[in-house]
Image (cartoon, rainbow, N blue to C red):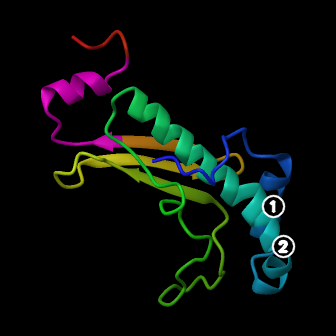
Amino acid sequence: MTTKNVRRFSGFSPAALKFLKDLAKNNDRIWFVPRKHIYEVELLQPLQALVADVADALRTWKIPIGADPMRLTFRIYRDIRFSPDKRPYKTNLGAYLPSTRGDGERGGLYIHIQPMKSFCAIAFYQLDKPLLLGCRPFGTRT
């Protein structure tokens, strides 16, 4: 579901990717806190716009994935309670768009943004034949 507060996705700026690279080198609160506004404007807002646009496109193609862009992006903060690695921040962005079928989670789409390591992955299991055929790339629907 697209939210009115989310702008259209136009890409991540060079400043956004530089921020993630710099965060990997300076992963501590003293460095992050004065730059948090950069994270929110250059990374979080574009990621929310990307999630909204992807959800809209998938809905148009009748692929049962949807998202509230404000809720489905992962936090930048790492859970370090039981980890030997005590760096407090993730050096990537992530979002998960779950299936909207309503009959239990049967898959979804994961988006991962990281300098030189970005990817997205989609997975479903136990699909009914009509949905399976609808999810296949064009030309392989037989």
Q: Which residues are magenta?
A: 123-137
Q: Nearer the viewer, mark 1 or mark 2?
A: 2
Picture coordinates of residue 133, whole percent (x, y): 23, 22
Residue at position x 54%, y 47% in the image: 51
Residue 21 in the figure: left or right of residue 70 = right
Q: Secondary structure at mark 1?
A: helix
Picture coordinates of residue 14, whole percent (x, y): 84, 47
Decide if residue 113 is in sight here: no
Q: Amino acid at mark 1?
A: Phe
- Residue under label 1: 19
Residue 48 in the figure: left or right of residue 21 = left
Q: Is residue 48 above or below residue 40?
A: above
Outermost residue on the front side: it is: 4
In the image shown, does 28 or 41 lie closer to the viewer? 41
Point out the image quarter for the C terminus.
top left
In the image shown, does 136 or 103 lie closer to the viewer? 103
- Residue under label 2: 35
Asked if labels 2 and 1 touch by Cβ distance under 8 angstroms, the answer is yes
